[in-house]
Image: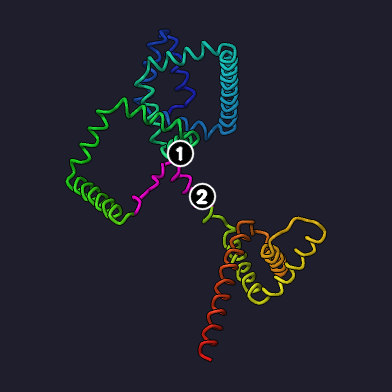
């Protein structure tokens, strides 16, 4: 096998004898294409015989490549900075250019939008829904305006939908059922059925509230505290209701004697009961004012049922005796 240095010397001599750059490049391409295996083997042999030199050349090449990338990055950064300054200094010209470019490239803009929408469908829909929810009145106005401009399109869409026999039959049955219900309510002297049609924005708000409620990690502990508090309050009032009312009456009387405004005896009794039960519980940090009010209403209803049952039992015993 010939020495690689002799091969390279022969190649240089051939290039020197044929100075035409275009012809030399073409001959080189042809030679490389015809002798790929031979060139690969020569390179491998030369590297094995000159490993230190090969590593030095490789390091030099990597340094040149890194320097070139650094220079190109600096050029791009300077270009971006110039473009940013130009945009800040010429906002009107920038806006005009953007509008003109969009007007001249409608198909390209539509293609870009469709491509982005396919890749980010959920994010685009979420942002659009958020914009509609932020201004529902504006959304309704835009919807009405679109409906006015596209009456024929809406009519065609409705005709296409009703062309399905099953859909058409279901709509007829639903309309007939609504008319029958309206006549039945009218004959019975009752007001017509009233349905609140929830908008898409309201449905999304309800879904968000439901997600926040059921996905709250503190919800189980919150429900436990509310349940224990409500049961304890009911038990306390059933067991100590008379004593709590005596305390409340004494408190109201003392306020009246010193000239303070009068307050409800029942409110004072339940306020004191809430205070006592809260002090006895281990944790009440998640309870809200609405929770306390709901527990008080539940306790009042249970105390009333117990009182009525006691009165009924006393009446029955009196009749039997």
Instruction: Looking at the picture, tell me which residue is in the foreground, 265 or 99.
Output: 265
Instruction: Looking at the picture, tell me which residue is in the foreground, 288 or 193.
Output: 193
**Residue at the spot x=20%, y=45% of the render?**
168
**Residue at the spot x=60%, y=18% of the render?**
81
Q: Can residue 269 be found in the magenta stretch?
A: no
Locate residue 223, reporting x and y percent: 58, 63
Q: Residues within 10 Å of mark 2 (few under 14, many from 20)?
A: few
Answer left or right for 6 relative to 257: left
- Name the residue beneath numbered marker 1: 126
Q: In the figure, 195 relative to 305: above or below?
A: above
Mark 2, mark 1: which one is toward the viewer?
A: 2
Q: Can residue 194 be found in the magenta stretch?
A: yes
Magenta span: 190-212
Q: In the figure, 197 relative to 185: above or below?
A: above
Is residue 282 at all visible to an observer of this figure? no
- Name the residue beneath numbered marker 2: 209
Q: In the figure, 81 relative to 189: above or below?
A: above
């Amino acid at each position: 096998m010939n020495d690689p240095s002799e091969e390279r010397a022969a190649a240089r001599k051939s290039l020197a004898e044929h100075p035409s750059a275009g012809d030399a490049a073409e001959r080189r391409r042809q030679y490389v294409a015809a002798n790929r295996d031979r060139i690969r083997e020569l390179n491998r042999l030369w590297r094995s015989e000159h490993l230190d030199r090969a590593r030095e050349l490789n390091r030099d090449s990597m340094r040149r490549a890194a320097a070139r990338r650094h220079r190109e990055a600096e050029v791009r950064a300077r270009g971006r900075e110039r473009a940013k300054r130009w945009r800040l200094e010429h906002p009107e010209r920038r806006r005009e250019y953007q509008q003109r470019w969009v007007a001249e490239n409608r198909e390209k803009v539509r293609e870009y939008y469709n491509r982005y929408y396919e890749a980010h469908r959920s994010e685009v829909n979420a942002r659009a829904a958020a914009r509609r929810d932020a201004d529902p009145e504006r959304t309704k106005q835009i919807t009405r305006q679109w409906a006015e401009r596209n009456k024929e399109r809406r009519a065609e869409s409705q005709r296409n939908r009703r062309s399905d026999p099953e859909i058409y039959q279901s709509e007829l049955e639903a309309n007939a059922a609504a008319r029958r219900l309206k006549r039945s309510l009218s004959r019975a002297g009752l007001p017509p059925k009233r349905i609140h049609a929830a908008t898409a924005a309201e449905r999304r708000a309800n879904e968000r509230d439901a997600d926040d409620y059921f996905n709250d990690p503190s919800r189980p502990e919150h429900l436990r505290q509310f349940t224990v508090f409500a049961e304890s309050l009911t038990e306390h009032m059933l067991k100590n209701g008379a004593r709590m009312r005596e305390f409340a009456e004494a408190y109201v009387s003392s306020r009246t004697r010193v000239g303070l405004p009068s307050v409800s005896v029942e409110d004072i009794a339940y306020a004191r009961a809430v205070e006592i039960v809260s002090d006895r519980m281990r944790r009440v940090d998640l309870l809200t004012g609405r929770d306390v009010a709901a527990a008080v209403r539940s306790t009042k209803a249970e105390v009333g049922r117990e009182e009525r049952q006691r009165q009924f039992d006393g009446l029955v015993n009196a009749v039997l005796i």
